[in-house]
Amino acid sequence: MAIEAAATTSSNDLRPIPQPPDFHPAIVVPSQPNGLRFWQLMVAGSIAGSVEHMAMFPVDTIKTHMQAIRPCPIKPVGISQAFRSIIKTEGPSALYRGIWAMGLGAGPAHAVYFSFYEVSKKYLSGGDPNNSAAHAVSGVCATVASDAVFTPMDMVKQRLQIGNGTYKGVWDCVGRVMREEGFGAFYASYRTTVLMNAPFTAVHFATYEAVKRGLREFSPERVGGGEEEEGWLIYATAGAAAGGLAAVVTTPLDVVKTQLQCQGVCGCDRFKSGSISDVFRTILKKDGYRGLARGWLPRMLFHAPAAAICWSTYETVKSFFQDVNGDSNTA
């Protein structure tokens, strides 16, 4: 009898509780990463990307000249030679040729880049800040999306960088490429760019998060024990380490990307198929394996400080928005 009574009681406890007809269960909406709205992540990323690329643009121009086969006006060997060649034959302004194309592409692309990364990281990491695999995969997702936005203007930028007098400006380049080569020319290097940036971003984000975490543990007095109070020095150091390492690892694919984007411009080689393997074979035939390392030093010198600038700017803007959101919530 006692057992039957217990069973009856247990069965009664499991019966659903009647609810009034106008009852609606509360829907819990997951909070945005770091308490920020999606548009705030996009704004922070856009500002960071624009500042990064504008500040380091001359170094990027030197790298492009070094990587292009038969670049105009001469074929430089090292950074100093490339720099002197550009200054002597084209003037200091040539270091900034194509910067407007960079500005048009970098802002929107980095808005997509960082917002996709933050959202992906939130859902893939499961709340574990030490999940390097989630950071790497999130970075790959971010770069696939952002490269679709950035690749056309990156192609225009590189053609302007090496094509002294070939194009009158950004829109002249866009119009002529569209008429002479078709829309597909804007995405000729997209596959290579994704293949390059996927490992680049995986290494970059995983390294950044790991170094940032290590620095916070090593010197907690600098960061005050809270993520919101981290110093810009932590962001800059972690960003520089991540950018430099990722840049060196992916230089061969960056050389291939430059070849594809600059083909046929100012004496640069044009490839029949436009395939990655075709470009690899051409580079190896002309320059050997050393050709795949062209521009590795300026690439590293570009990405290390660029990443430091980008991450410190991005985290600073995020902190600003967090303060704004906090003030609005307490008002």
Image: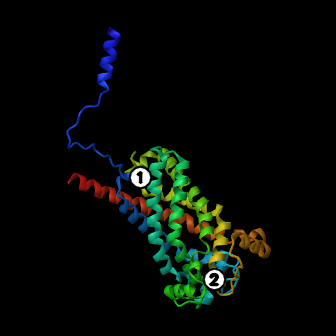
Q: Nearer the viewer, residue 301 or 112?
A: 112
Q: Nearer the viewer, residue 239 or 149?
A: 149
Badge 2 marks a residue whose secondary structure is: helix
Residue under the point 41% across and 49% down? 223
Q: Which residue is mark 2?
A: 84
**Quadrant of residue 70 in the image?**
bottom right
Q: How many marks?
A: 2
Q: Which residue is mark 1?
A: 230
**Which of labels 2 and 1 is toward the front?**
1
Residue under the point 56% across and 61% down? 243
Q: Position of residue 234 (x, y in %)?
A: 47, 54
Left or right: 51 with respect to 286? left
- Residue that sits furthest to the top in the current view: 1
Badge 1 marks a residue whose secondary structure is: loop
Check disc 2: other Cα within 10 Å, few if <14, some if 14-19, many if 20+.
some
Residue 28 versus residue 146 in the image, above or below = above
**Quadrant of residue 197 in the image?**
bottom right
The structure's colour scheme is rainbow
Residue under the point 28% across and 44% down? 26
Q: Amino acid at mark 2?
A: Arg
